[in-house]
Amino acid sequence: MLKRKPYTGLTRQLVLAFDIGTTYSDISYSILQPGEIPQPQGVTKYPGQGQVGDCKLPSIMYYDHVGDLKAVGYEALKDELVEVALTEGWVKLESWKLHLRPKHLSSAHIKDSDIPPLPRGKSVVDVLTDFIRYLFQCAETYIQESYPRYIWLSVKDEIQFIFTHPNGWEGAQQQHIRRAIVLAGLVPSTPDGHARVRFLTEGTLDLSMYSMKFDPTSFEEIAPAECRLQGSVFVTRRANGLLQKKLRGSRYSSPEMIDDIMNTFDQTTKLHICNAEQPAYIKVGSLRENDLEHDIKAGKLRLLGQEVTKLFDDSISAVINAFEQQRNYVTVPITMAFIIGGFGASDWFWSQLQSYFKSQGIELSRPSRVHKAVPDGALSFLVDHLVKARVARATYGTGCTVKVDEDDPEHLSRRETWFMSASGELHVPKAFKGILRKGVQTNEQKEFRHSFYHARAAQSDFGDELLSILCYRGTLPNPQWTDRDQDSFSTLCSVRLDLREAAKTLIPTRKVSGQEGFFYSLNFDVIILFGSTEFSAQLAWKVNGAETRSPVTMIYDED
């Protein structure tokens, strides 16, 4: 058991961790008291909740026809609310988080048309803003009711926030979340406000692989994280298709009835199915309900065990395939594995993975507090800071030009693209300079530099420039050109550089090879830190041998 150290801060502080899930969401918090050992707590009471103590909030929302939010979570499940929603034509949102997904993820089974559309005039950031605002109000109410009022008043203006997101999400998705956090009023849109928000990777079906060190306890990531869009919600989606087929032509085939049966499936059958050879049952109405033609007897729909267990096949295969891919990167034996999150509560999912990992000589475990594992882990990430190293899950670099080398066959094959630079030298475009290779281990302090040389005809030509940071997700071990395996390159972000200050001390240089005229040349480095869950960068150059640095702006395109 990890021995957590006392909080060393000088003032009381509140940390809130939000795990916004596709199906359910959770909130954890910790009130850090100077000199005391931090303890993670969970928000266990939400508006409209029947039985207090369930940590999960359904990620369901209703909007009316003009785009106003009408109900969230448990309140959206109330019978009287559902009746009003049907009468008034409100829009029900489920699985809306998938609208944020990066398009590069392994998700051929998901199309935009498969995801319930957003309300008219609402973007996914708008919806996320409404949901974050609601979660924060729930946390605020719960903490104020659980502690003396002075506790909340002493911490409310400097709350530290942690938001989890799937491993495959990157800067563009973090930018959407950050914008929603600001619009929801949690932090101001200032450097200090942004510094109060941290991101931590987790879940759809995410696999991270770590080695553990003792005395002191720490973890190092040893393989690139893998993400698959095959989580619990996709078992439910496949079950929806099965139920529509089974109940077609019955009085239970309406979308509303299917939704009710699906909710029961999620809370019972999906969790407890454990034998493919025995039938599975889903409660349908009262004990008087009978429809033998559709296998309904005494209020229960009978399904073949194999029909239900087949719904898990793609998700189980996704875990195994991702694990095997990760294992190719490690040189140490893997001895233990853990299933974290709500999917681990499914007995069939658990048993099939347990059987696989046992065949590999690996012990598989699932924490009993599965639904709070992600937000509690997020608190540990900030409070304990045990993860000391991460592994790049792709190759990152920049597109660039290189000086022509007439002894290089590749350069000769690109002769038609050669051009004359301001210095009078021949260059070839579409080269790729790798800064961080996939599989390389890094940490929060490790800097990765790429040196640049810019030549301009006039000193005043140095100003704001955009440098694209490219991400390569293909199979080439050492990509050299951006037009080779072109579909595997994408722009991670752009770095806005202000070169005016760095160019102030430049002096003119005569062009090469006896050409007439002068030019100005600037050598500078772009420094990138990849070790955190968010990338950061700096601009560096030298003046009289001393290095000078300045901040840069990271710009993410809409994904």
Image (cartoon, rainbow, N blue to C red):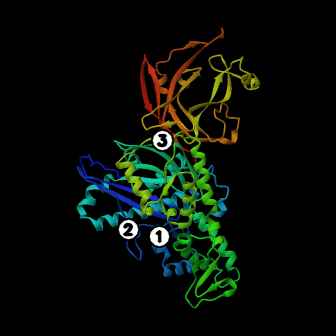
Check disc 3 and report the residue beneath it.
390
Does the residue at mark 3 contact the one at mark 1 (Cβ under 8 Å)?
Answer: no
Mark whose residue sits in front, 3 or 1? 3
| Sequence-first disc among 2 and 1 | 2
Does the residue at mark 3 contact the one at mark 2 (Cβ under 8 Å)?
Answer: no
Eyeballing the image, is 290 above or below 476?
below
Which numbered disc covers residue 512?
none
| Residue occupying the point 57% across, 23% down | 454
Mark whose residue sits in front, 2 or 1? 2
Q: CA distance from mark 3 to mark 1?
A: 35 Å
Residue 18 is left or right of residue 251, and the answer is left
| Sequence-first disc among 3 and 1 | 1
Q: CA distance from mark 2 to mark 1?
A: 13 Å
Residue 29 is left or right of residue 228, and the answer is left
Check disc 1 and report the residue beneath it.
73
Residue 198 is left or right of residue 352, and the answer is left
Q: CA distance from mark 3 to mark 2?
A: 33 Å
Check disc 2 and report the residue beneath it.
44
| Sequence-first disc among 3 and 2 | 2
